[in-house]
Amino acid sequence: MRIELATQPADPHRPNEDFASVALPASGRGGALVLLDGVTPPPDGATGCEHGVAWFTARLGGALLELLAARRELTPAACLSAAISRTADAHRGTCDLAHRRTPQATVVLARWDEERVEHLVLSDSVLLAEGTDGTVTPVLDDRIARLAALGPVTDAQRNAEGGFFTAAADPAVAVRAVTGSWARAEVRALAALSDGAARWVEVFGAGDWAECFALLAKEGPRALIDEVRAAERADPDGTVFRRGKRHDDAVALHAEL
């Protein structure tokens, strides 16, 4: 097994709100990965919470990884639900968790053993799976993309029926995630990308998902992020490649199983 991980903040003077980690149980059988992309608050900073987004993603990511590794009887969705509840309980007494902009994150997770590879994706981060035949399959929650095709995506559509969903303070959101599994014998490797790293495909069109996976496998996650940063610097104002912000926190993970 070979695992590589790289991350870079959008601004070196601000906390990186992305999170990624891997667990390899002591039994030596299987493992789990978690990637979260923290949702940056609006310019006024109003979230109803005294904690930052980086605090939230560290708490939620840590809880998720523990549950995935230690509670194998729970489905990935059940692990996400329990992790959201645990994180909410950690600041329920001090913060307004009903605030629409309470700290929240996109979620990618995968868990594997000798039989299955389970996965879950919530919101616009990406999971890629390479099959033993070389085929690369993207697992996407495309609700934001479908909404954006119809017009500007608004805050009113966040965690609302007919809108899009993120992991915030409501554990019931876990049932909204895209979930599934593959036979372990059919999967050679996995990759997870926050949308800041997925810009390589989704914004700059440098290649498709298979080509993105090939870059990760050959040159590593840092090379992918470096190419994204170079493309951002070449079009700083988004004149050619429209995007919400010049740079974004980026994290990429590649795991050969």
Image (cartoon, grey):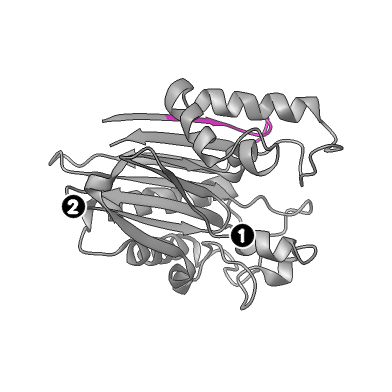
Q: Residue at x 48, y 21 (%)?
A: 219
Q: Was residue 9 drawn as part of the magenta stretch in this picture?
A: yes
* Percent coordinates x, y for residue 3 in the rendering: 34, 30
Q: Which residue is mark 1?
A: 49
Residues rendered magenta in the picture? 5-14
Quadrant of residue 249 in the image? Answer: top right
Q: Which mark is residue 115?
A: 2
Inspect the image, locate mark 1, and give the three-letter code of the amino acid beneath it. Answer: Cys
> Residue 162's x, y, as percent?
64, 76
Task: Please tell me which of labels 1 and 2 falls first in the chain.
Answer: 1
Categorize mark 2 by other alpha carbons within 10 Å: few (<14), some (14-19), many (20+). few
Quadrant of the image occupied by residue 13? top right
- Image coordinates for residue 2, horizontal then vertical, percent: 31, 28
Quadrant in which residue 5 is drawn = top left
At x 77% / y 37%, what residue is drawn? 246
Give 51 or 136, whichever is nearer the viewer: 136
